[in-house]
Image (spheres, coloured by chain):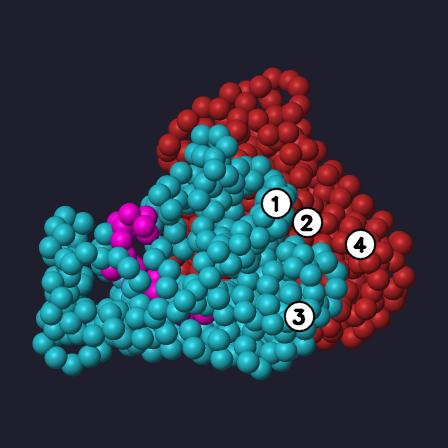
Chain colours: A cyan, B red
């Protein structure tokens, strides 16, 4: 059995495709370069003080209002929205309003989720409700959500109406996922299926929208958009499976999160629910420990060894291996969905490379 | 000078048009009858427990989940949305998705505003955040907002896209208005213009959308929709001016609110800001009292006479008369906007009757 204290690191999944890191880096960089200025211009439309609060949230200014470089994240969604336009034979620029709208919805959900979950930190910075108060977190979240629809609908085209409808469906799934996440917190047992459904709603739906929105704006038919959404949905599930692995076994110096961060937050993530769903003594021991943890108010005073014990039990009960295999399965389903879509070979290759990147990433 | 303790009641405005109460009652009743079943079906789409929380908010069930008759409010907006369709020569049913979408946005804003403002009661019932917690109030508000766009966009028509765009613009104004409302609470002085702008955003914008959405769905051009919006915007300002009068001088047994409710909440409503903007000793006395009140934490222990004194000073400084005249001015502007619109005479008459009703109502 693993001690759980062995050096973490390397790829957390069993997958090891040869990936073109430079290609993925360039693709993500293009998304940032093309979409971010338009996103900033959109956010600038907000009336004071909402514009300032939003700028703080995005990391463009610090809590005192001074310009800040900020960590803008991986920006997978904007990159996908531009590729999405190219998948329909349009120029990447056609996808920009879609990229911006999806980012606005994503950030609306972060603002509200952080408040609902009581999370005080995001990307090493105090969250908006912590700095500007709960009312501003609610209000600016609402404003970003409205702005997302505004940005698309002001294009005034039939395609924009179709794209907004897909964005609205994705937004509702995002909200459903958060509702499930909240209700699961209070339950002792969550099934693997329930966890996958929740993660599909919270992560899959908006990635699906990102990878269809550009194509829809570029005139793609519904069948093409649906196939791209299937790719995006399973890419999201693969992404989240890896996230769940990194949340327990990731290297803190690479992920930027605290060691064992998901265990500290008592998250019922995939490795945990998969371990609990298995038979055997490790699973039963884990269940007993987690049941006791649920009643304990001082999980933050646990020492490293206590988390290591839990991580080792999850691994011994098969939760780590199952989640790693699940990431690979979702990756395969995502890539298979692209087969039915007629698109330029270079675009298809980039979508596949991005899927490869998602499951071998270390942060 | 008025003592402020004289019997309140009768019409709070100086307006006294002869109105056809039965006509307005029938118009509001039709809105409820046609739109409410569709609204309930829309809300039923929400995943548990959000459907239950929303049903509680709308007054369809009580806090224990038992069916409840509930006070569904005046339902001015649904009635306007159906008339709006008829203004464009369409059947009232064409306006139903618009009526439902506008009600959903209105209720999204109530859920979030009650939480932001810390209001524990709405229409004699505990607010959602008080009964189901802040997270559910945020989440269900978000869900209703998303649902509003979904209901319109799934019509799949060009008109639905245009209607949704107008709804989105109105939603953003609603959010701007709430941002202004919050920021004004912390300020000693608010100008009459700022107050009108805030009330235009909070009340005018969505009424404007209600009275244009049906017409847009019925194929009206932008000029017609804009003229209808102008009517609705000023109708909203007239409505709010009367609300502000009722918030101080309304009869509690008719309005259902506590006596002097707006004074208890230290609201910088139109009569207050108009009184403070005037010259003279009453205005100065009022300013001193309100400045002291702002620092006092126990305004709820004030006796009737203390509120009566403030109300009398507002009246003496001209705040009551100005607001009453403002309601009449906004009414006139609203009705004048209809002149440019080609519509069936019966529809025009009903829109005028509704405007008349708004400024002579007692609750």
Q: Are marks 3 and 1 on the same chain?
A: yes
CB within 8 Å, label 2 to label 4? no
Q: Are marks 2 and 1 on the same chain?
A: no
| Relative side of B216 to B108, left or right | right
Give SS at disc 2: helix
A34 to B57, vertically: above or below: above
- Give the CA separation, mark 1 to mark 4: 32 Å
How far across and how far down the image is residue B53, in percent?
Answer: 42, 66
Disc nearer the start of the sequence (3/1): 1
CB within 8 Å, label 3 to label 1? no
How far across and how far down the image is residue A19, in percent?
Answer: 43, 64
Residue at 40%, 38% in the rendered image: A131
Binning the other alpha carbons within 10 Å of mark 4 as few (below 14), some (14 to 19) or many (20 upward) gives many
The numbered disc on residue B204 is: 2
Residue at 22%, 57% in the rendered image: A8
Q: Which residue is mark 3?
A: A88
Q: Which residues are magenta?
A: A235-258
Disc nearer the start of the sequence (2/4): 2
Residue at 53%, 26% in the rendered image: B188
- Give the CA separation, mark 2 to mark 4: 13 Å
The numbered disc on residue A37 is: 1
Q: Quadrant of the N terminus of chain B?
A: top right
Query: Magenta part mainly helix, strand or loop?
Result: helix
- Give the CA separation, mark 4 to mark 3: 36 Å
């Amino acid at each position: 059995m693993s001690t759980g204290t062995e050096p973490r690191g390397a790829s957390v999944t069993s997958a090891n495709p040869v990936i073109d890191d430079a290609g993925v880096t360039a693709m993500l960089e293009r998304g940032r370069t093309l979409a971010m200025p338009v996103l900033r211009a959109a956010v600038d439309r907000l009336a004071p003080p909402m514009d300032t609060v939003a700028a703080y949230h995005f990391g463009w200014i610090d809590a005192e209002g001074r310009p800040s470089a900020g960590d803008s994240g991986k920006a997978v969604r904007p990159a996908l929205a531009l590729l999405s336009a190219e998948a329909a034979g349009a120029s990447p620029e056609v996808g920009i309003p879609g990229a911006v709208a999806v980012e606005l919805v994503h950030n609306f959900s972060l603002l509200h989720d952080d408040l609902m979950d009581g999370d005080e930190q995001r990307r090493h910075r105090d969250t908006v409700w912590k700095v500007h108060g709960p009312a501003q977190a609610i209000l600016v979240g609402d404003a970003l959500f409205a702005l997302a629809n505004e940005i698309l609908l002001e294009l005034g085209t039939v395609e924009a109406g179709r794209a907004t409808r897909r964005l609205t469906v994705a937004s509702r799934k995002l909200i459903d996922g958060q509702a499930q996440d909240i209700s699961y917190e209070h339950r002792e047992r969550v099934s693997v299926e329930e966890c996958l459904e929740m993660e599909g709603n919270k992560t899959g739906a908006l990635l699906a929208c990102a990878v269809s929105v550009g194509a829809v704006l570029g005139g793609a038919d519904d069948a093409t958009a649906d196939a791209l959404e299937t790719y995006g949905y399973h890419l999201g599930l693969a992404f989240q499976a890896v996230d769940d692995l990194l949340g327990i076994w990731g290297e803190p110096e690479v992920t930027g999160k605290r060691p064992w961060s998901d265990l500290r937050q008592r998250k019922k993530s995939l490795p945990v629910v998969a371990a609990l769903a298995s038979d055997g003594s490790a699973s039963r021991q884990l269940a007993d420990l987690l049941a006791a943890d649920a009643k304990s108010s001082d999980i933050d005073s646990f020492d490293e060894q206590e988390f290591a014990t839990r991580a080792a039990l999850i691994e011994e009960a098969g939760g780590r291996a199952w989640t790693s295999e699940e990431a690979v399965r979702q990756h395969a389903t995502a890539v298979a969905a692209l087969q039915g879509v007629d698109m330029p070979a270079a675009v298809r290759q980039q979508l596949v490379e991005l899927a490869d990147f998602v499951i071998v990433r270390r942060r």
